[in-house]
Image (spheres, helix red, strand yellow):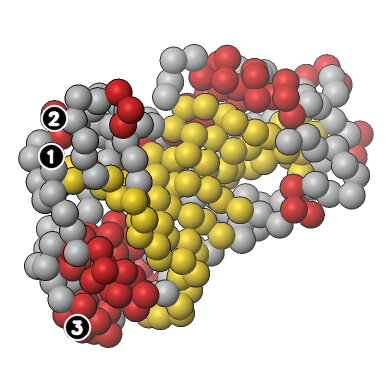
Amino acid sequence: MRCADNMHNLARYLIFFQYIGTKYRGATKVPPHQHDRKGVQDHLEDAIRRLRPNNPVSLSVSSRTDSGVHALSNSAHFDLQRMKDKPPFTEDVLVEALNYHLGTEQIRVTRAYRVPDNFHARYRAQSRTYIYRIALGFSHHSLLPLTDCELCWNLSNTELDVEAMREAAAMLVGTHDFSSFRAISTDTPFKSPVKTLDVVDIQPGSSFASAHFHREFSFWELKFQSRSFLYKQVRRMTGALVAVGQRRLSVPQLRDIMEARDSLIYPKHLAAPAHGLFLARVDYREEDLHPSTGNSTD
């Protein structure tokens, strides 16, 4: 164990960061043998190493997102000890330095907080909010405004049965066994399928270029909030809700899928694609972000 003299300038930081996930193999680190595309974590750790810390760089990301999924605000913590006994970076300086070293990557650090050395970005998170964006009336993604291409799911439908979708969404709210809405992964046997969904909401959305495009079209946003989610749960729930909106699936049929509690009963090719999904926010208790020492800035 390191002695206290060697740790007096060791600081733990929580950072919030955004990314366009199109070119990245998800949020977390990619194994060395798969380095044809890096994960967002790989690029963030590279940027931290360029600050020349005295300690090994290890980032703990709060929320895993799949390849192609985006984030308006993900979070992670890491420890950083500067060389030659230099004092810890202030939050603002750290944000600027990391963004400088990220260069042209489609990743941006938005905020940083000094946090206690027992803080954990994943386990201290109180809730996670995902937004799924849907554009109606586009038979092919190449017809979308450039600002929305690869940032939403384009459907050829010009309308959806939103009331039926909201009825189905209400059925998902609360504490349930969501086995039917999780994809199989290596950690499936070790994770409880019981989750509590606090919010499932469907509201009109908008294009990033709505005021500057030559035609009008409809956008919808599906919002999901929970403390945590199962693997691909949001994309599977979105696909099922859209199928209800397209009248390809009835509300009773969706209830049957849910009550089956079996991932294999979920219809093939129904899950929504990755590129319409955004991790919108990760929330923490205010006292975790602003401990009594008051060394954080917004």
Q: Which of 47 and 298 is in front in this view?
A: 298
**Image position of 21 with respect to 196: above or below:** above
Q: Name the residue under label 2.
A: 143
How packed mark 2 is, by other alpha carbons closer than 10 Å (few <14, some 14-19, many 20 or more), is few
Give the camera-side residue of 217 and 73.
Answer: 217
The local secondary structure at tag 1 comes to loop
Say whether marks 1 and 2 touch (CB < 8 Å): yes
On the image, the x and y values in percent for residue 69 come to: 34, 42
Tell me the CA gap for discs 3 and 2. 35 Å
Neighbor class of circle 3 (other Cα within 10 Å; few <14, some 14-19, many 20+) is: few
**Residue drawn 31% across the image and 31% down it:** 210
Instruction: For residue 177, say whether it is visible.
Output: yes
Circle 1 residues within 10 Å: few <14, some 14–19, many ≥20: some
Please name the amino acid that badge 3 sits on.
Pro
Q: Earlier in the sequence, mark 1 or mark 3?
A: 1
Quarter-of-image position of residue 19: top left
Left or right placement of residue 269 versus residue 197 in this view: left
Q: Are marks 1 and 3 in contact (CB under 8 Å)?
A: no
Q: What's the distance in space between the residues labelled 1 and 3, CA to CA?
A: 29 Å
Determine which residue is flagged by label 1.
138
Q: x, y percentage for residue 112? A: 68, 34
Amino acid of disc 1: Phe
> Which of disc 2 and disc 1 is earlier in sequence?
1
- Which residue type does callout 2 highlight? Leu
